Amino acid sequence: MSKVVDFYFDFSSPYGYFAATRVDAVCAAHGATVNWHPFLLGAVFKLTNAAPLTTYAIKGDYARHDWARLARRHQVPFEMPAHFPFGAVSASRAFYHVRQRDPAEAVRLAKALFRAAFVEQRDIAQVEGVAHVAKAAGFDAEDILAGIRDPAAKDQLKREVEAAIARGVFGSPFFIVEGEGFWGNDRLEEAAAWLDSGGW
Amino acid sequence: MSKVVDFYFDFSSPYGYFAATRVDAVCAAHGATVNWHPFLLGAVFKLTNAAPLTTYAIKGDYARHDWARLARRHQVPFEMPAHFPFGAVSASRAFYHVRQRDPAEAVRLAKALFRAAFVEQRDIAQVEGVAHVAKAAGFDAEDILAGIRDPAAKDQLKREVEAAIARGVFGSPFFIVEGEGFWGNDRLEEAAAWLDSGGW
């Protein structure tokens, strides 16, 4: 399994959540592993003059409808967070704090955080909320709290955001396969197919 | 064939062009006919605070790359127009002028116009360019010129743009199937699948 798909997402992105529920399985079916990269859409939006989907006229209503419909189609639980959009800084730092020791555990934490936000109506915008979700998933809450405040995790997140922008990432989810970028949950299968086909 | 897919597009939209090359075949495979509806993205962009894709930082570069890649994947000819974006008013009016007499002929004209713009590097922004492409496709150039200037075609286009907005259309291409909207060339298969499945 030497093939790798880079999976960029923002923890507050509903389309990112949907992708997170299936990215590992879809890529594994094509013999690839996935590198998870939480980043901050807000930083990118400043460059692209964009804003959270729900703030747009017409398009925002479409997105809400589409999310509920996607949940039904993929048969995954989904409930729109009461507070949206929300900040993903704490969740992202916690991820990178865990990743430096164990990437697989960081992915497990990411899935728990996504589920907390988009299924369980839990607040993951605040440090305490992230620690609470982590603890429920079997992580050491004190370690997570310390990690979120650790300058190392802060620096790592900053570097990841800069790297994402440098690689052309401008939305969530975004997949990079052999240097090719694919934007959007609905391009996941295409990104994975690129691996098998050798591209087109 | 009582099932119908409403296909909304702007003649200056590359993703609209790609959808136009396959929408009839994809929908026919699901037992549906397609109603083609050119509209004007500019009118919608005023409401959604959006702009042509190529004007955005990062996202614009992605779009150009993605269009060339899509052309290779679907094996359809594509060359980025030298002047982009371009106005689609004349092309759209010509379409509705022809459609009032013969919808199938209007679709044939639409395909010729898309091909002229995105394959043959022809200017379809101006009235004369549209008439020239129409003539090469076997239409009566004088009739097309008169039609573009006819208040009836102008009014029909205005009504179509208003109807598109009222139905939640905010991008190109956009498909509406049994009241369900699907945005984007990469959602065409999903929109068509909705017809067979009875929805989800």
Image: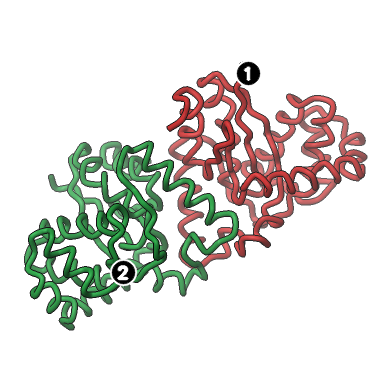
Chain colours: A green, B red
Considering the numbered disc 1 on the image, is that residue within a helix, a strand or a loop? loop
Which residue occupies 17% across, 48% down? A33
Residue B30 on image: x %, y %: 51, 21
Mark 2–mark 1 CB contact (< 8 Å)? no
User: Which residue is farthest top?
Assistant: B1
Quadrant including the C terminus of chain A: top left
In the rendered image of this protein, does residue B48 appear above or below residue A32? below
Q: Quadrant of the N terminus of chain A?
A: top left
Q: Is residue B15 above or below residue B106?
A: below
Going by the numbered disc 1, the residue's amino acid type is Ser
Position of B96 relative to A62 (above/below) = above
- What label sits on residue B2 in the rendered view? 1
Pointer 2 residue? A88
10 Å neighbourhood of mark 2: few (<14), some, or many (≥20)?
Answer: many
The subunit letter for the residue under badge 2 reads A
Q: Is residue A156 visible?
A: yes
- Tell me what residue is drawn at x 8 percent, y 60 percent: A138
**Which one is nearer the viewer's eye here, A179 or A139?**
A139
- What is the tally of numbered marks visible in this picture? 2
> Horizontal placement of A60 versus A26: left or right?
right
Residue B178 occupies quadrant: top right
The spot of residue B119 in percent (x, y) is 62, 41
Q: CA distance from mark 2 to mark 1?
A: 47 Å
